[in-house]
């Protein structure tokens, strides 16, 4: 695969992931803050998490122009997505009522692996 193709796919992935996180952060924040505080009084974890991912989404769109200048942010997103997925899976086993939320870890695993693979390939193609 040519270097330009590697970077092209990484740029596309950054825009998609950034847009997804930004949508989740901004679009669903209003709904979830209301729903979560109504249904689960005193627990602020999901709105905080969604706010963080929304902010991360905005900042992932920026490196889509030149990903090789923002490798630490991209690697942080990949690894933090995988760690979050592992935590959610572990919590689901501890609290059986959360077993139905299996789509979140799957999405985070896909995001983490996709960014890691594309970033690694783009780094290999980098001209010293």
Image (spheres, rainbow, N blue to C red):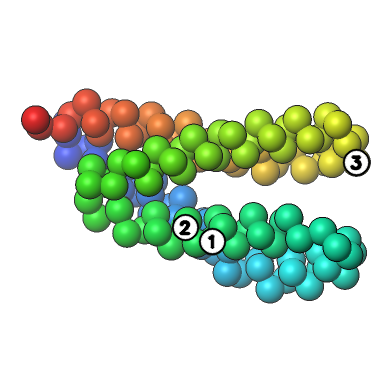
Residue under numbered circle 1: 54
Q: Quadrant of the C terminus?
A: top left
Q: Residues within 10 Å of mark 1 (few under 14, many from 20)?
A: many
Q: Residue at x 86, y 31 (%)?
A: 94
Give the residue furthest to the front. 42
Residue 121 is situated, as x and y percent measured from the top left of the image, at 28, 28
Q: Residue at x 61, y 69 (%)?
A: 27
Q: Judging from the image, what secondary structure is the residue with disc 3 in?
A: helix
| CB contact under 8 Å: marks 2 and 1 | yes
Residue 46 seen: yes
Residue under numbered circle 2: 57
Against 37, residue 12 (above or below) is above
Against 51, residue 3 (above or below) is above
Mark 3 and mark 2 lie on one chain; the one further toward the N terminus is: 2
Residue 58 is situated, as x and y percent measured from the top left of the image, at 43, 62
Q: CA distance from mark 2 to mark 1?
A: 5 Å
Q: Judging from the image, what secondary structure is the residue with disc 1 in?
A: helix
Q: Judging from the image, what secondary structure is the residue with disc 2 in?
A: helix
Nearer to us in this view, 35 or 4: 35
Residue under numbered circle 3: 97
Against 80, residue 117 (above or below) is above
Q: Is residue 69 left or right of residue 95?
A: left
Q: Is residue 50 left or right of residue 101?
A: left
Q: CA distance from mark 3 to mark 2?
A: 29 Å
Q: CA distance from mark 3 to mark 1?
A: 26 Å
Residue 24 seen: no
Marking on residue 66 = none
């Amino acid at each position: 695969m040519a270097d330009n193709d590697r970077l092209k796919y990484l740029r596309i992935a950054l825009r998609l992931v950034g847009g997804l996180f930004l949508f989740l952060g901004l679009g669903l924040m209003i709904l979830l803050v209301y729903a979560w505080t109504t249904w689960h009084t005193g627990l602020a974890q999901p709105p905080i998490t969604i706010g963080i991912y929304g902010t991360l989404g905005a900042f992932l769109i920026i490196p889509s122009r030149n990903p090789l200048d923002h490798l630490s942010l991209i690697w942080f997103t990949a690894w933090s997505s995988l760690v979050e997925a592992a935590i959610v899976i572990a919590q689901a086993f501890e609290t059986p009522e959360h077993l139905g939320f299996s789509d979140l870890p799957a999405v985070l695993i896909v995001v983490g692996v996709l960014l890691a693979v594309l970033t690694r390939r783009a780094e290999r193609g980098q001209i010293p």
